[in-house]
């Protein structure tokens, strides 16, 4: 068992984030479900409670560093440590412009908003929690990335999303390099999952999509550091 380790999940009100909260709480992690919208977060906490899973809640918009500071302060005062962070919050904004969706028509606004949430959101969380984890002598950070961010297979269908996830992988590598042996920072592609983002035709159920995320969040001392995983196997950057 995990000795009641403390886990924070961003974007925990639905989709993969909510299922990660459910599975970690089922494994006796003390979970703090966070969301940018308090009413949605409260509903998610209530849904878990009705399944017999108690989790704490705090509001957290990953675009706002002071918001992150408040959430982290709350977790430390309520639970005393931060052992696991799942940077799951994400947006997928690329829409066709005049029937086209490619790098030539993507707006600055779409690019900046995508990077602000998908890349800098994870960066801000890592910057805040890595020293706390180092002090505590234990940490697992899972950045929920995407195969869309793999450089080896880059097209230009969703430029803002792709660039933001490639850069998120760089966040993983930078903080993995900054961490010492006790803190492990990795990226995961969950696969194509039936969520609001993935849509109804996706290949995987949500419970399947979180499998690699939960595996790395709960991995033991032999956990990898600075790697990119899908289906529990490393994949190319
Ligand atoms: N589904 C897939 O096929 C797939 C594939 C590859 C990667 N992923 C990645 O998996 C992660 C979870 O996606 P999902 O499929 O579960 O999508 P989803 O159902 O759209 O959920 C996204 C979550 O992110 C939250 N969020 C958005 N902006 C935020 C912000 N500024 N601060 C805090 N939370 C914010 C959303 O909150 P609101 O409810 O308030 O909007 C929601 O809880 C994302 O990072 C996504 O890129 C998904």
Image: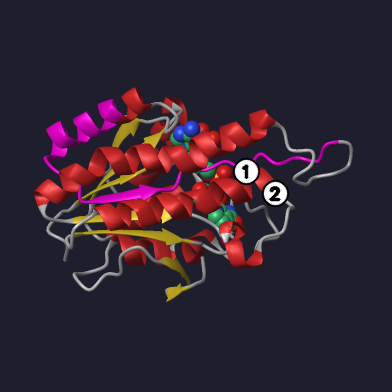
Residue 92 screen position, x and y as percent: 62, 43
Taking the magenta stretch, the answer to whether it contains residue 83 is yes
* Residue 19 in sight from this viewpoint: no
Q: Is residue 228 left or right of residue 96?
A: left
Pointer 1 residue Cβ closer than 8 Å to ligand 1: yes
Could you say whether the residue bearing mark 2 is in a helix, strand or loop? loop
Instruction: Say which residue appears at 89% left-offset and 42% top-offset.
Output: 99
Q: Nearer the viewer, residue 133 or 219?
A: 133
Tell me the magenta residue range.
69-97
* Residue 30 in sight from this viewpoint: yes
Q: Nearer the viewer, residue 118 or 106?
A: 106
Q: Is residue 166 left or right of residue 58?
A: right
Residue 144 screen position, x and y as percent: 45, 54
Q: Are marks 1 and 2 in contact (CB under 8 Å)?
A: yes
The mark that comes first in sequence, 1 or 2, is 1
Taking the magenta stretch, the answer to whether it contains residue 72 is yes
- Above or below residue 67? Residue 125 is below
Look at mark 2 in the image and give the residue it sits on: 158
Residue 4 screen position, x and y as percent: 15, 54
Instruction: Say which residue appears at 52% left-offset and 70% top-offset.
Output: 236
Alpha carbon of mark 1 to alpha carbon of mark 2: how far? Answer: 8 Å
Look at mark 1 in the image and give the residue it sits on: 92
């Amino acid at each position: 068992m995990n000795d009641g380790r403390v886990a924070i999940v961003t974007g925990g009100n639905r989709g993969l984030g909510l299922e990660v909260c459910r599975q970690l709480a089922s494994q006796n992690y003390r979970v703090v479900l966070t969301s940018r919208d308090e009413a949605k977060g409260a509903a998610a906490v209530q849904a878990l409670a009705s399944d017999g899973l108690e989790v704490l809640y705090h509001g957290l918009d990953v675009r706002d560093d002071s918001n992150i500071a408040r959430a982290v302060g709350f977790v430390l005062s309520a639970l005393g440590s931060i052992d696991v962070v799942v940077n799951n919050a994400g947006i997928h904004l690329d829409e066709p412009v005049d029937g086209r969706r490619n790098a030539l028509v993507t707006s600055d606004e779409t690019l900046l908003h995508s990077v602000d949430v998908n890349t800098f959101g994870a960066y801000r969380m890592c910057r805040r929690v890595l020293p706390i984890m180092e002090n505590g002598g234990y940490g697992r950070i899972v950045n929920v990335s995407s195969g869309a961010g793999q450089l080896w297979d880059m097209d230009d269908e969703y430029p803002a999303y792709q660039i933001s996830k490639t850069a998120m992988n760089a966040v993983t590598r930078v903080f993995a390099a900054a961490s010492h042996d006790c803190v492990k920072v990795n990226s995961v592609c969950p696969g194509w999952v039936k969520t609001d983002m993935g849509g109804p035709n996706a290949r995987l159920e949500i419970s399947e999509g979180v499998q690699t995320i939960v595996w790395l969040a709960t991995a033991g001392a032999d956990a990898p550091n600075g790697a990119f995983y899908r289906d529990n196997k490393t994949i190319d950057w």
